[in-house]
Image: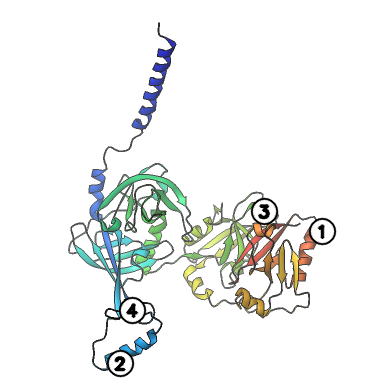
Amino acid sequence: MISAFRRAALALATATSLWIAGPASAKGPDSLADLAAQVSDAVVNISATQTIEAKRGKGGGDMPGMPPGMGPGAPFDDLFEEFFRRRQGQGMPDLPRQRKSSSLGSGFVVDASGVVITNNHVIADANEVTVIFNDGQKLKAEIIGKDQKVDVAVLRVKPEKPLKAVKFGDSDKARVGDWVLAVGNPFGLGGSVTAGIVSARNRNIDSGPYDNYIQTDASINKGNSGGPLFNMDGEVIGINTAILSPSGGSVGIGFATPANTVTPVIEQLQQYGETRRGWLGVRIQNVDDAIAETLNLGSVRGALVAGVDDKGPSKPAGVKAGDVIVKFDGKPIKESRDLPKLVAATPVGKDVELVIMRGGKEETKKVKLGRLEDGEKVASKDAGDKEKPESSGPASQSALGMELSRLTDDLRARFQIKDTVKNGVLITSVDPSSNAAEKRLQAGEILLEVNQEPVSDPTDAVKKIKALKDAGKKTALLIVANGAGDAHFVALPVE
């Protein structure tokens, strides 16, 4: 008969053996050597050199042979600049006025004729770019095009014979847990191969308007930027772009721009030398619970239109601030950051349908998309022509935990309010214990509208808020702008 002690020991041993067997059955590939050998020759090192004009007098450090504090950047540097001019006029050799700054990164060949892909930030502002191959060959590269928004650049080299190239894969098929391989030039150590898994997808790290990174725990460090992230079929599913690290080294959190995000951009750069993205001409923000309730959306969804560009394509289509875009070209908008990616990927000039929520009801608007780059060129010129309204009410009033004042010249100067901000009332202080403070409203912002009605002075704002309260409304929907005029919606409980 087996004793109770022995039965317990046997059960523990069985449980332990099963626990050990679990991870063993879920192990990764036995070796990645064949895959590494297959793709490594297509991965290159990128050396980017920038020549910087070393302007004397603006911070260059001490000069050789001079006492500390007596070179460029010193308090009397203007005098030294004059000294250098006289020195040169007397036939004495001038000191170097330029210096070179170099950076190293990674890239990969996508066309055997010599097309190389890397990150924009690897070669940005470079005067000279050199592509270095695994066999030691160095070729000067021409920059065909680059895009800051998704951080990609297209280079061209002229090889004597066809190069080893790799292809992009479908990054939408990558699943969390899939094995991936990163190849690159970390810390100048070219040809380094690291492996890991897809840790997450569609990551937003607030680096740009089209963030949807693949997160991986494959070791990525400085110098890996611009290098490829491969799937197990040897296809590039991402471009290694950023890391999250308090130390500067890999902590197992790296980010790659998905192939499906960059390939349309690369095609445009190759064809036109620049990007051609769709443009709606609206400023948007997230919808929170309070805004969804105020606008009768039923649930938190869509992109709230905070403003409409007067020269954009949405204006003539009848889109207004306060509308919530819930569908674009037949695709649902779950959250505001979905919209810019869809719009940018849509051809310029296409007629698209917008489904909006207005007053709790759905409406459909048809918009002919403009070109984002054209909109950006005229944005700085669109300053607005409305004159500042006259006001005869009290200079300041209190409402919803905010002190509101008229926009006087003194207050404009104090809070650095741009002249382009013509209307509204200034928030001069916020009660730290109020709902306004909880919503992060702060002094120096401008209240433009209350429940989609413009306010002209503090008394006007207080009356509109009181009218909401008297009507039994629970929430006031405010449009608030910063000193530069960038507006957003805020929903505040009516106290």
> Which amino acid type is shown beneath numbered disc 2?
Arg
The residue under label 4 is: 54
The residue under label 2 is: 86
Q: Is residue 375 above or below residue 33?
A: below
Task: Residue 486: tell me if it is visible.
Answer: yes
Secondary structure under the numbered disc 3 in the rendered image = helix
- Identified at 77% across, 70% down, the residue is 459
Nearest-to-viewer mark from 3 and 2: 2
Quadrant containing the N terminus in the rendered view: top left
For the residues marked 3 and 2, what is the alpha-carbon distance in whole angstroms?
Answer: 69 Å
- Identified at 39% across, 20% down, the residue is 14
Secondary structure under the numbered disc 4 in the rendered image = loop
> Which amino acid type is shown beneath numbered disc 4?
Ala
Image coords of residue 369 (percent x, y): 52, 65
The residue under label 1 is: 470
Q: Is residue 440 above or below residue 172?
A: below
Specify the quadrant of the image occupied by residue 102: bottom left
The residue under label 3 is: 290
Nearest-to-viewer mark from 2 and 1: 2
Image check: 129 left or right of 15? Answer: left
For the residues marked 4 and 1, what is the alpha-carbon distance in whole angstroms?
Answer: 66 Å
For the residues marked 3 and 1, what is the alpha-carbon distance in whole angstroms?
Answer: 19 Å
Q: Are marks 3 and 2 in contact (CB under 8 Å)?
A: no
> Which amino acid type is shown beneath numbered disc 1?
Asp
For the residues marked 2 and 1, what is the alpha-carbon distance in whole angstroms?
Answer: 78 Å
